[in-house]
Image (cartoon, helix red, strand yellow):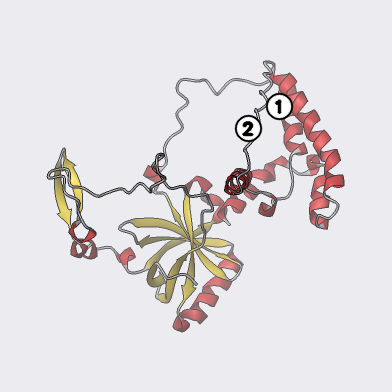
Amino acid sequence: MPRAMWKGAISFGLVTIPVSVYPATEEKTLRFNQLHDDDGGRIRMKRTCSIDGEEVGYEHIVKGYEYEKDRYVILTDDDFEAIPVESSRAIDIQQFVDLEEIDPMMYKKSYYLVPEETGAKAYALLREALNRSGKVGVAKVSFRDKEHLAALRFRDDAFVLETMYWPDEIREADFGGVDVSMKVRPNELDMAQTLIDNLSADWDPVEFKDEYREAMLRIVEAKINGQEIEVVEAEPTAKVVDLMEALKASVAAAKKEAKAEPATKKKAPARKKTAAKKPAAKKPAAKKPAARKKAVGE
């Protein structure tokens, strides 16, 4: 188990559950170092002072807030400790809401909350109560020099804390003057709905993988083995001016792929086969948004 990044307690009403916080996700991407093209030497970034040009060690680096151009106020660890908010010591649940009420755009990062031995029973009690009510807790918590809005829910037996953006951090959509309120014809809407139905299936995240990362790894392995890399020219995208023609072509392609899918997925689980063969038109369109939100939040 990785080292806990924060320790505190879940607090709601008079109930307190001591917990440790661990990251629940990890980003899997290839990391590249910057090298000197002449000799392959690693490029090092030095921390230098803008006034005297001297290199500065970590022990001499402090935090400063720029309140005017080139004018700073210095903040120490004691200043951060003195911030008078309850969330610096506890995950303070403010209220409980339905998961569907939270816009998925607000979610940032997921963390697991692991209880201390003394809080295990209260942890289990809150889990059962939340599962029965279908609610998630909305809380405040402070770590990494910032107070976070957060949603608390359970994933299987584990308590998950989802940090969220504050409402004033969500930008309004700006279309740059483009009119997106144009009217569409009924036949265009019907064709678009047909395309959505043909591409509809039960959500299974295991079916998705990072093809770019896998392709990059193959290139890295080939270069390690001294193989020559063949550059494949990308096929130009066909330009379809007529919207209806584009929809018809998309529907035809989706139907063709759906027919070929059973043959290529003979060893797939029975649930996946059913999803591929099931006409999605039988799924009421009104239920799609709620299902999507729940999937993102989970």
Out of 170 and 60, give the one closest to the viewer. 60
- Number of numbered tags placed on the structure image: 2
- Direction top: furthest residue: 241
Q: Residues within 10 Å of mark 1 (few under 14, many from 20)?
A: few
Q: Is residue 278 visible?
A: no
- Direction bottom: furthest residue: 118
Q: Is residue 243 above or below residue 14?
A: above
Q: Can you give x and y, in whole percent of width and height, for residue 292 in the image?
A: 63, 47
161 left or right of 273 in image: left
Identify the residue position indicated by label 1 in the image.
189
Q: Can you give x and y, in whole percent of width and height, for residue 25 in the image?
A: 52, 59
Q: Is residue 50 above or below residue 108?
A: above
59 left or right of 12 in image: left
Q: Can you give x and y, in whole percent of width and height, for residue 224 in the image?
A: 57, 49
What is the spatial separation of the Cα atoms under label 2 and label 1, in whole angstroms?
40 Å
SS at badge 2: loop
Q: Earlier in the sequence, mark 2 or mark 1?
A: 1
SS at badge 1: helix
7 left or right of 181 in image: left
Amino acid beneath label 2: Val
Identify the residue position indicated by label 2 in the image.
231
Instruction: Answer whether labels 2 and 1 touch (C-beta < 8 Å).
Output: no
Amino acid beneath label 1: Leu
Q: Nearer the viewer, mark 2 or mark 1?
A: 2
Out of 124 and 218, give the one closest to the viewer. 218
Q: Residue at x 86, y 39 (%)?
A: 259
